[in-house]
C-alpha cells in the first residue's frame, strides 16, 4: 500500500529547435515557431504549479542539439529553479539529441533536480510535496548520441518503495520512424517489474501497455508536418492502491495540421475553392486560439484533375488559400498555409480502348508492367536516364524510391504523360 501521488511525464522538449526548413515563411510565423518549444514547456510547468503535481520526469532530448543552446539551458535553469522553490523534484535522463558528451554551460542547478548519469542505471526516491515517499525513479542517460545497446536490460527494481518508475529514452520494438537507439522489446519492459515506463524518443503519443504502463507521451511541440495535431505531456495520477489514471495535456503553442480535400464528384473550381476555405476554417477552429501551420492534400479522382496538373496550378491555389487565411501579422491565431500537395487522379485511369495499340497504349502497358516489376522498372529507368545517372544525387534519389512509393510515382507519371500527349494532339 502506497500513498496517492501525481507526476508529470514529459519528454522530447527539443528546446530551441531551429525550424531550419522554413525559409520562405513570413517573419511572424518563423518567430512564433522559434519560440514555440519554450512556450509549450512554460505551459507545462505552469500546469505543474496549478495542479499541485508532486514531481516531474523528463525522458530525454530536453535540448535539440548535442551542443545545447545557451538560451535553452538558461531557460531550463530558470524554470527548474522555480519548481524547486515549490518543492517539486525533477528527474532527467538525456537522450540522443542531448547526450552527456555534448557541450554544457557550467551552471548551478537546484538540488532537487536529479540528472541520471550514463554509467549505470541509478535510482532515487521521489517524494510528494508533503515529504512522503511516493516512488523510486530509475534512469540512465546517453553517454553519446549513438547508443545501440539495450539499456532497458540493465534496469532492476530495488526493494523499499511502493511504486517503481523507470525513465528511459529508447526505441521499443524497432519503430521504423525513429533511429534504433537503445533498442528493446515491449515484452521485456512488461516483465521487468516496474509499474510505469516513462519513455522518450518516439515523437508520437502512444500507450504501449497498461499495468505495467509503458508510455510515450510524444514531443511537446510539433516541429514539422510529420508531427501534426496536439502535443504535450501526461499528468499521471497514482492511487494508494496503485491504480493509474493518465490525462493528456495539449500544450503545443503552434499546431501543425494536415487536411485532405477530395475532388471526387466535383464539377467546378468553385467547389474546390469552397472546400479549401472550409478546411482552413476547420483548422482554425480545431486550434482553439492557437496558430496553425496547415498543409492541404488534394486527392481523389475527378474531372478537376487535369487542370490541377498544370505547372502552376498548385502554387496558384496555395497563393489564393493564403489570401483567404489572412496575414500572420494581423492576428495571433493565424493559419499559415504552408503547402498544397496535389495527389489527384484522372476520372478514368489508363487509356481508352481504341488507343491500346497507339503510342499512349503501348506506353501505358510498359508503365504498368514496370510498376509491378522492380527489376524491369530499374532497367527501364537506367536506360532512360542514361548519362544523368552519373550524377550522384540523382542516382541516390532513384535508388531510394522503392515499393509502393515507386508504384505510385509510376502511376502518376503515366497519367501526366497521357495528359501531355492528349494536349499535343489537341484533344
Ligand atoms: Mn526526440
Image (cartoon, helix red, strand yellow):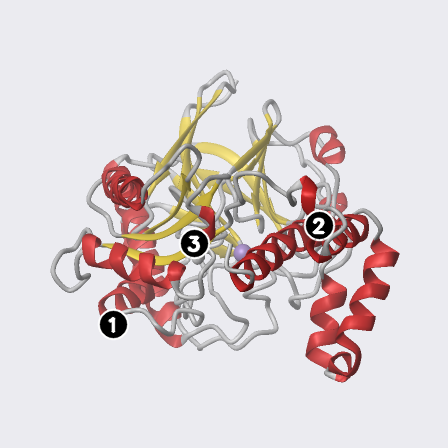
**Height in image: 225 above or below 386?**
above
Q: Is residue 113 visible?
A: no
Give the CA distance from mark 3 to mark 1.
30 Å
- The percent position of residue 271, horizontal first and vertical second, equals 29, 39
Ligand 1 picture quarter: bottom right
- The percent position of residue 223, horizontal first and vertical second, equals 43, 58
Label 2 CA crowd tier, 10 Å (few <14, some 14–19, many 20+): many
194 or 401, which lies in front? 401
Element class at badge 2: helix
Residues at circles 2 and 1 in contact by the CB criterion of under 8 Å: no
Residue drawn at (47%, 32%), measured in percent from left and top? 134
Element class at badge 3: helix
Residue 235 numbered mark, or none: none
Residues at circles 2 and 3 in contact by the CB criterion of under 8 Å: no
Front disc: 2 or 3: 3
Front disc: 2 or 1: 2
Residue drawn at (78%, 83%), measured in percent from left and top? 387
264 or 135, which lies in front? 264
327 or 320, which lies in front? 320
39 or 124, which lies in front? 39
Give the CA distance from mark 2 to mark 1.
39 Å
- The percent position of residue 302, horizontal first and vertical second, equals 46, 39
Name the residue tied to disc 2.
407
Q: Quadrant of residue 304?
A: top left
Left or right placement of residue 110 versus residue 35 in this view: right
Q: Quadrant of residue 153?
A: top right
Residue 27 numbered mark, or none: 1
Give the CA distance from mark 2 to mark 3.
21 Å
Q: Quadrant of residue 142?
A: bottom right
- The percent position of residue 162, horizontal first and vertical second, equals 55, 26
Ligand 1 under 8 Å from disc 2 Cβ? no
Amino acid at each position: 500500500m502506497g500513498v496517492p501521488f501525481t507526476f508529470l511525464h514529459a519528454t522530447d522538449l527539443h528546446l530551441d529547435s531551429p525550424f531550419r526548413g522554413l525559409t520562405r515563411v513570413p517573419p511572424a510565423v518563423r518567430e512564433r515557431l522559434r519560440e514555440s518549444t519554450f512556450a509549450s514547456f512554460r505551459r507545462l510547468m505552469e500546469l505543474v504549479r496549478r495542479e499541485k503535481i508532486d514531481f516531474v520526469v523528463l525522458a530525454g532530448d530536453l535540448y535539440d542539439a548535442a551542443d545545447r543552446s545557451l538560451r535553452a539551458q538558461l531557460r531550463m535553469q530558470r524554470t527548474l529553479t522555480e519548481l524547486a522553490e515549490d518543492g517539486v523534484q525533477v528527474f532527467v535522463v538525456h537522450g540522443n539529441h542531448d547526450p552527456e558528451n555534448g557541450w554544457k554551460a557550467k551552471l548551478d542547478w537546484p538540488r532537487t533536480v536529479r540528472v541520471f548519469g550514463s554509467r549505470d542505471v541509478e535510482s532515487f526516491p521521489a517524494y510528494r510535496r508533503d515529504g512522503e515517499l511516493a516512488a523510486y525513479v530509475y534512469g540512465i542517460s546517453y553517454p553519446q548520441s549513438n547508443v545501440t545497446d539495450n539499456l532497458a536490460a540493465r534496469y532492476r527494481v530495488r526493494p523499499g518503495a511502493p511504486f517503481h518508475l523507470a525513465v528511459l529514452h529508447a526505441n521499443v520494438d524497432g519503430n521504423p520512424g525513429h533511429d534504433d537507439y537503445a533498442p528493446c522489446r515491449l515484452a521485456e519492459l512488461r516483465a521487468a517489474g516496474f509499474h510505469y515506463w516513462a519513455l522518450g524518443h518516439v515523437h508520437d503519443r502512444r500507450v504501449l501497455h497498461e499495468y505495467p504502463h509503458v508510455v510515450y507521451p510524444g514531443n511537446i511541440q510539433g516541429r514539422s508536418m510529420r508531427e501534426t495535431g496536439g502535443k504535450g505531456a501526461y499528468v499521471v495520477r497514482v492511487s494508494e492502491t496503485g491504480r493509474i489514471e493518465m490525462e493528456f495535456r495539449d500544450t503545443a503553442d503552434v499546431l501543425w495540421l494536415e487536411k485532405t480535400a477530395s475532388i471526387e464528384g466535383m464539377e467546378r473550381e468553385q467547389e474546390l475553392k469552397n472546400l479549401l476555405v472550409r478546411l482552413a476554417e476547420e483548422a482554425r477552429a480545431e486550434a482553439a486560439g492557437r496558430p496553425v501551420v496547415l498543409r492541404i492534400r488534394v486527392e481523389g479522382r475527378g474531372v478537376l484533375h487535369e487542370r490541377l496538373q498544370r505547372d502552376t496550378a498548385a502554387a496558384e491555389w496555395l497563393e489564393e488559400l493564403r489570401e483567404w487565411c489572412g496575414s500572420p501579422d494581423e492576428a495571433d491565431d493565424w493559419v499559415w498555409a504552408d503547402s498544397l500537395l496535389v495527389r489527384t487522379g484522372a476520372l478514368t485511369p489508363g487509356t481508352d480502348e481504341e488507343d491500346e495499340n497507339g503510342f499512349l497504349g503501348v506506353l501505358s502497358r510498359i508503365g504498368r508492367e514496370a510498376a509491378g516489376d522492380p527489376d524491369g522498372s530499374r532497367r527501364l529507368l537506367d536506360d532512360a536516364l542514361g548519362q544523368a545517372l552519373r550524377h550522384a544525387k540523382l542516382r541516390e534519389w532513384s535508388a531510394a524510391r522503392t515499393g509502393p512509393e515507386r508504384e505510385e510515382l509510376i502511376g502518376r507519371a503515366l497519367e501526366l504523360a497521357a495528359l501531355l500527349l492528349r494536349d499535343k494532339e489537341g484533344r
